[in-house]
Image (tube, grey):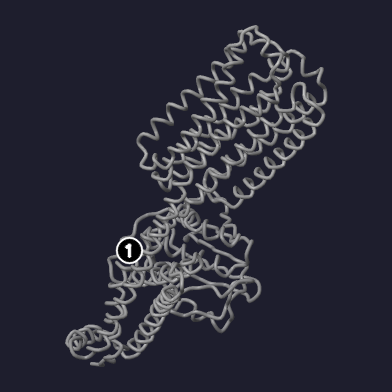
């Protein structure tokens, strides 16, 4: 009986112990990273909400500046207020551009709808501004029946899509953090109250310009806007009654009561209740807008005060979670290091009996056991090295974070730690999958090869998108693509092959995926236009832990652990098939999985 080297068997057992000990630790880190990412996505959605709210306010301020130019005003006042209108329009345009840029960078599922709504705002705003400019240039035209009211309605209609966009953003925040969405709803209600307060005041502009009292239709429109303002005031009061930060907002709420409801609103009510008295002939529209705007500005400050606790609370939560993740990762690294030290210290004392039994069992029925043991020892050494490398990198990065003056993780440092953790997790997962394929019972079934290829493409679409690569699936030719294989194993085999094509293919290129039916076989072909495989490397591409000097075009060397193609070949062989590779350096590579057809 040929004896296996004791060192190889010992390290096999040691690597298995370290791998099993790492799984719950890595799983815990993965969960914390997922939670952290969701909070970051919630923060991104909240930033989008705030930007949208600022744009909404800028459009409302522009509408107020436009109405301030109506009526009888001196030439000096006209120059000053026209300057204010020009500034207000430039602010609106700048915030719309900033919002468009944020939407282009954002990854939310609702961003496409938001982009369309913002385009609708632009399309409506251009003719509305032109109509208002025509009224500014012609005082006689302002006295035409319904001219001012129609121009104001056009400006309001241009801003209507903002309300739908705010709803979409609030839902986007709620997807990642329901707690963060609640204070946003309060800020949204305050913003709506300001908008309807502006509309309420705008309805009084035309009677003031015309020097007439309010008609029945005027009063009905004013009553609708007034009722909406009062309704929102009551809703906001109810929300504040149940909020833990209501004491922080009490001063801002009192300012709204004093500046708007006790001053601007009562001033507007005097005009409404004046009837046919001459007050409409003595009050100028611009003077009314100046007084009324102080009240709406107080509402805007109230809204900003309501937003501040929401953003601060979310930022604090993100910072605490990053510190928690730092502590978990540091403790986990120390535990793994201590476990590795124990294995080295007690080598040959407590493991030797089990090691001897394992060597005896492994040697039964294997005439070439010595050669295979050498391969196994090399494999374990490679796996041990690859697992220690990312763990050592994590510990080094954590030590760097601990020794910095601020003792805080930067986003770049956190991304590096996450990358190393995911690399270790994938390595363990690949190794476990490959081991399960050889140990567990193989359970084949009749499966649709085309459907499994489609599932694999769906699973890798995001990874391909990061490199600008398109996964193109050939159209089926009407044949049946049924094969006898274990669905999960075949799926992982196809995923590994396509993943290699994504890693090594050039950016912004296409990976072609096809299923063909021959007389007795079903062929799954994956073709890329990467740098290709050298002829001297071709005999070794399906061996475990074998990686070559090939690099992704225009990128850093592609990462991997040398297990993907080994698993693919093992899974295909379990299904009584074979996997072929055809490659030309500088042209590309094509892998073909050939399976018996049913």
Query: Residue 411: image x %, image y %?
Result: 49, 64
Q: How many marks?
A: 1
Q: Quadrant of residue 567?
A: bottom left
Quadrant occupied by the N terminus: bottom left
Quarter of the C terminus within the rendering: bottom left
Q: Quadrant of residue 55?
A: top right
| Viewer-side residue, 453 vs 128 | 128
What x and y, as percent, mark residue 171? 46, 40
Identify the residue at image location x=56%, y=54%: 473
Q: Using the image as rendered, state which of residue 456 and residue 201 is in the foreground.
A: 201
Mark 1, residues whose alpha carbon is within 10 Å: few (<14), some, or many (≥20)? some
Residue 335: x percent and y percent?
29, 76
Which element is circle 1 on? helix
In the figure, is residue 443 to the left or right of 564?
left
Q: Is residue 426 above or below residue 144?
A: below
> 11 left or right of 270?
left
User: In this orientation, does residue 389 appear?
Assistant: yes
Disc 1 target residue: 28
Residue 544: tell me if it is visible. no
Please provide percent x and percent y for residue 321: 38, 60
Instruction: Looking at the picture, tell me which residue is in the foreground, 471 or 266.
Output: 266
């Amino acid at each position: 009986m040929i004896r296996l080297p004791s060192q190889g068997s010992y390290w096999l057992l040691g690597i298995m112990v370290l791998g099993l000990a790492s799984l719950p630790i890595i799983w815990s880190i993965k969960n914390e990273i997922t939670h952290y990412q969701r909070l970051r996505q919630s923060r991104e959605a909240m930033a989008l909400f705030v930007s949208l709210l600022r744009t909404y306010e800028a459009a409302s301020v522009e509408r107020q500046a436009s109405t301030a130019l109506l009526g009888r005003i001196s030439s000096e006042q006209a120059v000053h207020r026209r300057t204010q209108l020009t500034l207000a329009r430039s602010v609106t345009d700048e915030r719309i551009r900033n919002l468009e840029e944020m939407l282009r960078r954002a990854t939310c599922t609702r961003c496409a709808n938001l982009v369309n709504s913002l385009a609708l705002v632009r399309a409506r705003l251009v003719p509305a501004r032109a109509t208002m400019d025509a009224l500014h240039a012609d005082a006689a035209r302002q006295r035409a029946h319904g001219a001012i009211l129609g121009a104001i309605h056009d400006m309001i209609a241009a801003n209507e899509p903002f309300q739908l966009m705010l709803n979409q953003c609030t839902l986007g925040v709620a997807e990642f953090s329901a707690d963060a969405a609640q204070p946003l709803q309060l800020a949204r209600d305050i913003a709506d109250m300001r908008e309807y307060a502006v509309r309420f005041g705008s309805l009084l502009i035309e009677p003031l310009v015309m020097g007439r009292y309010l008609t029945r239709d005027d009063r009905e429109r004013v009553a609708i806007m007034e009722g909406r303002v009062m309704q929102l005031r009551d809703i906001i009061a109810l929300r504040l009654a149940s909020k833990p930060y209501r004491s922080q907002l009490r001063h801002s709420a009192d300012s709204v009561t004093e500046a708007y409801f006790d001053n601007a609103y009562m001033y507007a009510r005097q005009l409404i209740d004046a009837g046919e008295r001459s007050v409409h002939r003595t009050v100028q529209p611009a003077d009314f807008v100046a007084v009324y705007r102080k009240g709406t500005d107080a509402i805007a400050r109230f809204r900003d005060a309501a937003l501040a606790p929401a953003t601060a609370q979310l930022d604090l939560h993100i910072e605490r979670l990053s510190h928690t993740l730092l502590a978990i990762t540091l403790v986990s690294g120390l535990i793994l290091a201590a476990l590795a030290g124990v294995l080295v210290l007690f080598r040959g004392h407590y493991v030797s009996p089990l090691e001897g039994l394992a060597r005896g069992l492994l040697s039964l029925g294997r005439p070439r056991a010595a050669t295979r043991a050498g391969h196994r020892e090399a494999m374990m050494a490679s796996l041990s090295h690859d697992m220690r490398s990312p763990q050592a990198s994590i510990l080094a990065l954590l030590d760097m974070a601990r020794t910095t003056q601020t003792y805080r993780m930067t986003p770049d440092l956190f991304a590096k730690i996450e990358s190393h953790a995911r690399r270790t997790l994938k390595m363990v997962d690949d190794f476990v999958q490959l081991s399960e394929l050889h140990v567990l019972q193989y359970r084949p079934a009749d499966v649709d090869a085309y459907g499994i290829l489609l599932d694999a493409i769906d699973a890798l679409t995001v990874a391909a998108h990061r490199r600008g690569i398109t996964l193109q699936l050939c159209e089926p030719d009407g044949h049946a693509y049924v094969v006898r294989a274990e669905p999960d194993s075949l799926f992982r085999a196809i995923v590994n092959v396509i993943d290699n094509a994504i890693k090594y293919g050039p950016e912004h290129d296409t990976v072609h995926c096809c299923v063909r039916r021959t007389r007795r076989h079903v062929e799954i072909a994956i073709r890329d236009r990467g740098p290709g495989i050298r002829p001297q490397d071709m005999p070794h591409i399906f061996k475990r832990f074998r990686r070559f000097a090939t690099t992704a075009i225009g990128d850093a060397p592609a990462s991997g652990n040398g297990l993907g193609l080994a698993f693919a070949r093992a899974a295909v062989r379990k299904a009584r098939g074979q996997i072929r590779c055809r490659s030309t350096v500088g042209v590309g590579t094509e892998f073909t999985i050939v399976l018996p057809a049913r």
